[in-house]
Amino acid sequence: MEEGFVRGMKIIIQEVFLKWKNTLLLFVPAFLYAVQNNLLLVAITHLDSAVYSVTYQMKILTTALFSVFLLHKKLTLRQWIALIIIVPGVGLVELSSKSATAKVSTTEQNPLLGFLCIVICSLTSGFAGVFFEMVLKGKKKNNIWIQSIQLCLATCFFCCLNAATTDLPRIRSEGFFVGYNKWTWITIMLNGFSGVLIAAVVNYTDNIVKGLSNCLSMVLSCIDILSI
C-alpha cells in the first residue's frame, strides 16, 4: 500500500508540476468559474428568483453554441429545438423549488446589472465547460484523475486569491476555518465528489449531456423538496 501511495505521488508530481504547461491550460476554466461564482452572487442580489432561474438556463444554449464552434459538433434541428424548449422548462422547475423559501429583498436592486451578470455567467459557463472538454479529450490526454487534480489546484489558487483580497483581516483575526462545521465539510466533500463525476460525464460524453443531466438533477431536487 505504501509503495502504491509513493508511486501515485510521483505520478502526480510529474504530471501536475513537472508538466506545468498542461496544468496551466486549466487555469483558464478555473479563472472563468471563479469569475462566474462571484458574478452569480451579484446577479441573485439584483434579480428576483423568477428572472434569475429562467435566464441562467441560457448556459445550456451557450454550451451548445461553443460546442459547435470550438469542437465542431453537429446538432440536428430536432436537438436545437429540444435545447430551446429545455431552457424555460428547467427555469420554471427551479423557480418552483425556490418559491417556498423566497424572501423579499431589502436591498435596492439594479435589474440591468443583474441581467448583465447572468449573460456573462452563461457565456463563461459555456466556454469554460467546452474548453475543459477540449483539454480533457485533447491530443495530450491525461488520466481523468490527473485532470481533476489540475483543475482543483487551479481553482484553489483563484479562490484563495479572492479570499485574501476580500476577507484577509477576518482570516488573520479569526482563522481560515472560522464558521466551519460538520455540514460545511460534508458539503465540501459532496461537491468534490460531484466534480469528479462531472469530469467523468464530460470525458465519456460531452458538455451538452452534462447540461441535460444537470437539468434532471434540478427536477429531482424539486420533487425532493415537494415531498418534504
Image (cartoon, rainbow, N blue to C red):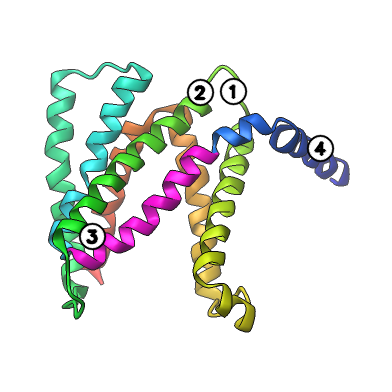
Looking at the rendered image, the quarter that the N terminus falls into is top right
Q: Secondary structure at mark 2?
A: loop
Mark 1 surroundings: few (<14), some (14-19) or many (≥20) residues within 10 A = few
- The answer for how far apart the CA atoms under marks 2 and 4 are is 23 Å
> Taking 64 as reference, is 134 left or right?
right
Q: Which residues are magenta?
A: 27-47
Counting other residues with Cα less than 10 Å from the Cα at mark 3, is it few (<14), some (14-19), or many (20 or more)?
A: some
Residue furthest to the right = 3
Q: Are marks 1 and 2 in contact (CB under 8 Å)?
A: yes
Name which residue type carries label 2: Lys
Residue type pointed to by label 1: Lys
Compare residues 14 and 218 and report the one nearer the observer: 14
Residue 217 drawn above or below residue 107: above
* Camera-side mark, 4 or 3: 4
Q: Which residue is mark 3?
A: 222
Indicate whether 192 appears above or below 167: above
- Position of residue 151 relative to residue 178, above or below, is above
Determine crowd level at label 4: few under 14, some 14-19, many 20+ residues with C-alpha closer than 10 A.
few
* Up/down of 98 relative to 19, above or below: below
Q: Name the residue tied to disc 4.
A: 10
Residue 141 is labelled as 1
Q: Which residue corresponds to the image point at 38% horizontal and 58% vertical from the top-left?
A: 38
- Would residue 41 be counted in the magenta stretch? yes
Tell me the CA gap for discs 1 and 2.
Answer: 6 Å
Near-viewer residue (25 or 200)? 25
